[in-house]
Amino acid sequence: MAAKSTGKKTAKKTAKKRNGKKAPHKRATTRKTAKKMSPGKRSAKAREKDPSGGLTAAGRRAFAKKDGSHLKPGVTKKAAEMTPQEMRRKGSWAVRFYARRKIPPLLDAQGRPTRHALSAHAWGEPVPKTVAAARRIAAKGERLLARYRRVRKA
């Protein structure tokens, strides 16, 4: 036996034939939501920043592509092993970041180090949690710059 068809399909077909137009498509009532990223996956933008401080190699390349800069990774060598140029770079960084009159926040509301504080890790220094710790990094930078000036004169 053949199954009886309901009148709905034939009504749509006849309406289509009469008007020469398709019957309106019924839209789903559920709204699409943006997919949330799983904790294991990070965006390309997130991979440019090193979670322990500073930029990754991909981040330095992105800056070079965007505005033509030539960023280098921080100097993490011991003072005895540094070249004069490395002394100057690290000393300048330390003074610029941590010898300011007013230092940007080193900890956020949850007590985690800010990106400003984490930059010390990228340069081989302990992450400062207090202003006094930041000033110690600045003093080390001053000593490196003084040593650079002595080496340059000789």
Image (cartoon, rainbow, N blue to C red):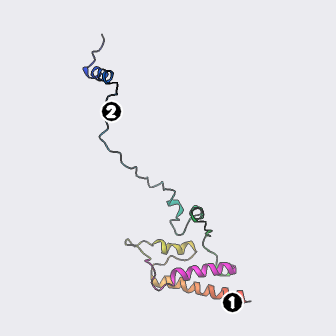
Q: Is residue 126 magenta?
A: no
Tell me which secondary structure the magenta stretch mostly adopts.
Answer: helix
Which residue position is annotated with label 2?
25
Q: Amino acid at mark 2?
A: His
Q: What percent of the width, then of the height, locates residue 68? A: 61, 66
**Which callout, 1 or 2, points at the residue further toward the start of the chain?**
2
The image shows residue 24, relative to residue 144, as above or below, that is above
Q: CA distance from mark 1 to mark 2?
A: 81 Å
Q: Quadrant of residue 153?
A: bottom right
Q: 29 or 54, which is in the foreground?
A: 29
Point out which mark residue 96 bears: none
Residue located at (71% from left, 86% from top)? 152
Q: What percent of the width, then of the height, locates residue 2? A: 30, 12
Q: Amino acid at mark 1?
A: Arg
- The quarter of the rendered structure image containing the C terminus is bottom right
Residue projecting furthest to the top: 1
Q: 13 or 84, which is in the foreground?
A: 13
Q: Between tags 1 and 2, which lies in front?
A: 2
- What secondary structure is marked by label 1? helix
The image shows residue 12, relative to residue 77, as above or below, that is above
Q: 82 or 47, which is in the foreground?
A: 47
- In the rendered structure, the answer to whether residue 31 lies left or right of residue 100 reads left
Which residue position is annotated with label 1?
150
- What secondary structure is marked by label 2? loop
- In the rendered structure, the answer to whether residue 105 lies left or right of residue 80 reads left
